[in-house]
Amino acid sequence: YKTHQEEVTISDNQTLEISPKLIADYASVTIASSENTYIYINGQSKGKAPWKGDLASGVYTFEARKDGHRPSEISVDINPDQTGKKYEIPAPKPIYGTIDVQSTPSADVYIDNVKIGQTPSEENIIIGSHQVSIRKEGYNNYNTTVKISEGTTEKITANLQERKTQSQTSYSSKTNTNGSRMYTVRYPVSDSN
């Protein structure tokens, strides 16, 4: 609230009743930005967007931050007349690096479990750590983690190995009778039979 100040004169044996009217010196505001951004007010984290709260009159810097993005900010002069107002901070801009994926044989490329194409593949992706998987039916998957930096190219080369299948052995059986006894013989069938 704004400071209330007035001059009064009190005489002996006099009671003076004062009823100052306090005037709000803050505004209840909402600060928003794009999805999955975090709000900072004058450098102090306020949590995930949107943020709602009371701010005393004054000049503030509202900032939106998001991993792998350049922060964006606005400067606002808050006064009580702005109660109920919503401030929208522009979405942070993504920062990109490049990933170059090669494989023998050609295969599907997944980044963070999202298929982006087939090898050979060169893609711009947001900086930070990413899970890369190279997959082809009948071959073992190639999985790795890469850290992408701004303005650089991370190269991945994979030589996929054919998936080994468990050998399947065929069996044949014969049943013979010898008096009152019966027995079964099982033996592998070779390719030459």
Image: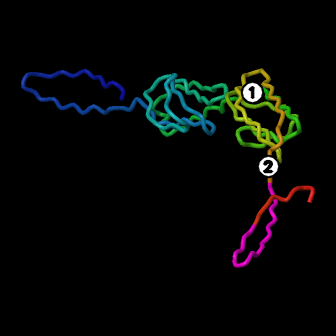
Which residue of the protein is positioned furthest toward the right in this rendering?
A: 192
Tag 2: amino acid? Thr
Residues tagged 1 and 2 counted as in contact (Cβ below 8 A): no
Q: Quadrant of residue 2?
A: top left
Is residue 133 on the magenta stretch? Answer: no
Q: Which of marks 1 and 2 is nearer the N terminus?
A: 1
Q: Mark 2 points at which residue?
A: 165
Percent coordinates x, y for residue 9 in the rendering: 18, 21
At a point 70% along the width and 35% down the height, the residue shown is 131
The residue carrying pointer 2 sits among few (fewer than 14), some (14 to 19) or many (20 or more) residues within 10 Å by Cα, namely few
Asked if 98 appears above or below 36 in the picture, the reply is above
Front position among marks 1 and 2: 2
Asked if 138 appears above or below 191 in the picture, the reply is above
Magenta stretch: helix, strand or loop mostly: strand
- The quadrant of the picture occupied by the C terminus is bottom right
At a point 80% along the width and 56% down the height, the residue shown is 169
Q: What element carries label 1?
A: strand
Q: Is residue 43 left or right of residue 107?
A: left
At a point 21% along the width and 31% down the height, the residue shown is 18
Q: Is mark 2 on a helix, strand or loop?
A: loop
Magenta segment: 168-184
Foreground pick, 58 / 147: 147
- The quadrant of the picture occupied by the N terminus is top left
The residue carrying pointer 1 sits among few (fewer than 14), some (14 to 19) or many (20 or more) residues within 10 Å by Cα, namely many
Percent coordinates x, y for residue 59 in the rendering: 51, 22
Q: Which mark is residue 8?
A: none
Asked if 107 appears above or below 144 in the picture, the reply is below
Foreground pick, 16 / 86: 86
Q: Mark 1 points at which residue?
A: 96
At a point 80% along the width and 62% down the height, the residue shown is 171
Which residue of the protein is positioned furthest toward the bottom in this rendering?
A: 180
